[in-house]
Amino acid sequence: MSEKSEKTEPRLSVFKTYKLYVGGKFPRSESGRVYEVTDSKGNWLANAPQSSRKDARDAVVAARKAFGGWSGATAYNRGQILYRVAEMLEGRKAQFVREVADAEGLSKSRAAEQVDATIDRWVWYAGWTDKIAQVTGGANPVAGPFFNLSSPEPTGVVAVLAPQESSFLGLVSVVAPVIATGNTAVVVASEKAPLPALSLGEVLATSDVPGGVVNVLSGRTAEIAAPLAAHQDVNAIDLAGADEALAKELEIAAADNLKRVLRPQPVDDWTATPGTERMTAFLETKTVWHPTGSLGASGSSY
Amino acid sequence: MAFEYAPAPESRAVVDIAPSYGLFIDGEFTEAADGKVFKTVSPSTEEVLSEVAQAGEADVDRAVRAARKAFATWSALPGSERAKYLFRIARIIQERSRELAVLETLDNGKPIKETRDADLPLVAAHFFYYAGWADKLDHAGFGRRTTNGHSGANPRPLGVAGQVIPWNFPLLMLAWKIAPALATGNTVVLKPAETTPLSALFFADVCRQAGLPKGVVNILPGYGDAGAALVAHPDVNKVAFTGSTAVGKEIARTVAGTSKKLTLELGGKGANIVFDDAPIDQAVEGIVTGIFFNQGQVCCAGSRLLVQESVHDELLDALKRRLGTLRLGDPLDKNTDIGAINSAEQLARITALADRGEAEGAERWSPACELPTSGYWFAPTLFTNVTQAHTIARDEIFGPVLSVLTFRTPDEAVAKANNTQYGLSAGIWTEKGSRILAVAGKLRAGVIWSNTFNKFDPTSPFGGYKESGFGREGGRHGLEAYLDV
């Protein structure tokens, strides 16, 4: 009897505790703070960690630590790993469709389109890792007996303020180009819709992306962005998720160590195929000279 | 034993410096709105060369308006026509190169050997190189052409470029700024440094001879306040600056929150790394070129010598012997290796930093070297027993002062080389190819010279990592700074 009546009760679901993703681990905010995340109708979805300045600093340390290995990996290897991210996402599609639908107030089918486009975006950037150097670098025909080669190199640790509106496609559209070229990232998720970003951390953790390459923080964008913009060990900042006033304030702070700054770009349609600008914004050009010497001629130029 | 040379001065007669110059705005020389003038002196003699109008805020505004007006027609010209203007400029500079070399040496203090053999040929080459780009921008890889035959957006010029340049390579830095700006269809307002305004004003005359439409190039001699006004002007679309890191940061703050595109080429503390298998004599020449070219007043100077411990003594002996043969004196003398420091202010800075090196315990050495009695001079100087904590190993001195440090392993060399806020240049000296490539790959610097140093070419992108600035000048990369891409 009692067994039968239990079956009619709806099963109580297990909530997920959303946590940060820093250095390959899933910590809570060191501040112990959370904030309430709701869907577009105001219904409670989760309590997300409200990251502090200290969390931001810890994430920078993790990103710096990961930079040598990630930037030193072969471009082919990075491509395979980014492709692996797409594979893992494909399997978790249902979860992301639900999260994106909740976050952005979209129907299931519209949310599914967003998630499909997001997965395809990972694939697109996975294919760029071993091509960007040939597009942006090359040999320079200097007027002298020298071999002269310019190559792009990742700029280092990049702070990324993810777009506020497009919680998943927008997020991946700004994160993937940063890491495709070998940078490491500290990502500040959309303030009101951080859940897809926090879940992305779980995908990255199981995609062979080394810990620390992408670090995801949730919380108040302005509070987390300020210490990142002023941080002396951050090399660049993408201001996509900052409004006009905040973007100006952060760009001023970023001047202290001459961070490369990508100002907020108007994006009408995140599904449009991107250009290479989000990659080149965080690349340095290194030019190496060497004498060529001369064979068969009298004397040597070296 | 040193050979004595008879004086071999280049003739000053080839250049005719007027007693006064105006600002060059909208194709005309004009006085400053407030009538202010300043004197420019020859740093080797302190002789006043000319009196030059000093631009203020009102003049900046006038020049920007002129450039804005000219932009509409200049940017609408077919690229092939813009190209021909730039080719003309390149050719006229070649024709007048001796005159401009002497002028530059007089106003800057650097040896005629350098202005004649380095600055001027590179200036002409830079214009010639970018001239050829003007009608090929669609092929520069910045626009996108889709596979279904539709063309993506072709790159567009930005508008009015505000450019502020330093005194160490006055005409060359002008060329680096103006050539790509004009090739891409922008118009410019350029402020030369207050101690070296003359070659920019002569360039205005080159523009006249080339028939360049008025307002396309405007030259505003002046001080930092004029530069600040130019950078802050609301109708400037692009800011390009070469100079100190401190000013570069200030400019970055000024343009924050605007749509102005910014490129900065700033300070450096380049490491010149010599491994134990390096050809010592060639390395010595590279070290000398690295730090004594242009009296060390070079942002990409190899101002830190990192030498492998096992060859330290041998290398230092050879280096000191070589420094003993450098000839310091009259910059117009064709045998002069080391000219004058550009200004009293710069001399004071170099002197203070060198004194600090001594005070902090590094060992100072200079060859026997008689300094002229007038003008601004500083003997070639090297410091040994320098550690990474010493001020002279960290701060850019921008003078003929070399700090010598040692290392044992390649990893240590890389770590020390990268231990700086800067990242502009570095040198590697070794016979081992794989080591060159490994070390070059790990150095965080924009230009790596291996078994050579201080080589420049218009086709070769130049610029820094970290606090040495961002953006590249030269080559295809140099176009990007002036295009809406």
Image: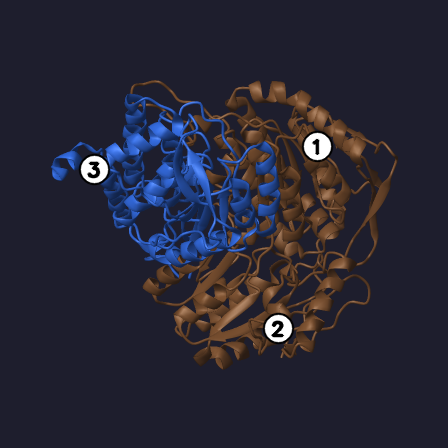
Q: Colour of chain B?
A: brown
Mark 2 → mark 3, Cα distance in angstroms: 64 Å
Q: Which residue occupies the foreground of this view, A270 or B177?
A: A270
The answer to whether B143 is drawn above or below residue B446 in the figure is above
Q: Do the residues labelled 2 and 1 touch (CB within 8 Å)?
A: no
Report the residue at 75% width, 29% height from top: B61
Label 2 chain ID: B
Task: Name which of mark 2 and mark 1 comes first in the sequence.
Answer: 1
Residue B382, disc: 2
Q: Which colour scheme is used?
A: by chain
Q: Which residue occupies the foreground of this view, B279 or B183?
A: B183
Q: Chain A is drawn in which colour?
A: blue
Within 10 Å of disc 2 (Cα), the crowding (few <14, some 14-19, many 20+) is many
Mark 1 → mark 3, Cα distance in angstroms: 53 Å
Residue B233, disc: 1
Where residue B347 sits: x, y (%)? Answer: 74, 62
The answer to whether A182 is drawn above or below residue B388 in the figure is above
